[in-house]
Image: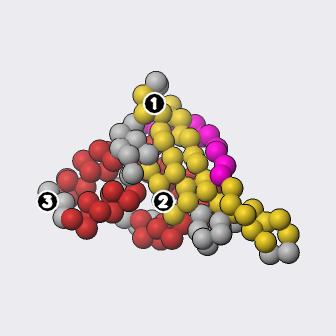
Amino acid sequence: MSEYHVIYSIDHGVSTGFGLKSNEKTTERRTIDTSSGLSALRKSLIQAERLAQSYLTNTDGEVSVGFKIVQGDSLLDLRSLVEDELKKSLPNLDGGIQRELDTMFPTPDYCQVKDTLFDRIKGDRI
């Protein structure tokens, strides 16, 4: 087992009363003990979904959760983990999948998902 440190950035809303909302960003840190980077990514996505469900939506009506995973002193290349796994079952990644990956991974080491995407990715094999 290896120890992975996950740094979550949550873009959410806060209520100031009387139905008024304002945007806020919160950072949370978690530690995951697991056997691989891919397993750490899976567990981080599950935790990101829980975090998205526990915060109020922002003024756009969404909760966005992004995260980075650190192992030792290095950031994991999350996009490559997913691409490598996808290539095992889909040798030729089409443009639609590439666009989805571009949205989910704005940089190789950062995963960002909105609460509306969790239903789409929950059952998929990542």
Left or right of 39? Residue 97 is: left
Q: Which amino acid does the dot numbered 1 rest on?
A: Gln
Residue 1 to residue 94: above or below: above
Q: Which of the 4 quarters of the picture holds residue 110?
A: top left
Q: Which residue is most to the top?
A: 73
Residue 73 to residue 113: above or below: above
Residue 54 marker: none
Left or right of 116? Residue 121 is: left
- Is residue 78 visible in the rendered image? The answer is no
Residue topped by disc 2: 113
Residue 109 position within the rendered picture, expressed as x and y whole percent measured from the top left: 40, 41
Inter-mark Cα distance, 3 to 2: 24 Å
Helix, strand or loop at disc 3? loop
Say which residue appears at 35% left-offset and 39% top-offset.
Answer: 77
Left or right of 14? Residue 104 is: left
Q: Which amino acid does the dot numbered 2 rest on?
A: Val
Say which residue appears at 42% left-offset and 70% top-offset.
Answer: 120
Which of the image's four quarters has the N terminus?
A: top left
Residue topped by disc 3: 92
Residue bounds of the magenta highlight:
25-36
Residue 63 position within the rendered picture, expressed as x and y whole percent measured from the top left: 59, 63
Dot 3 or dot 1, earlier in sequence: 1
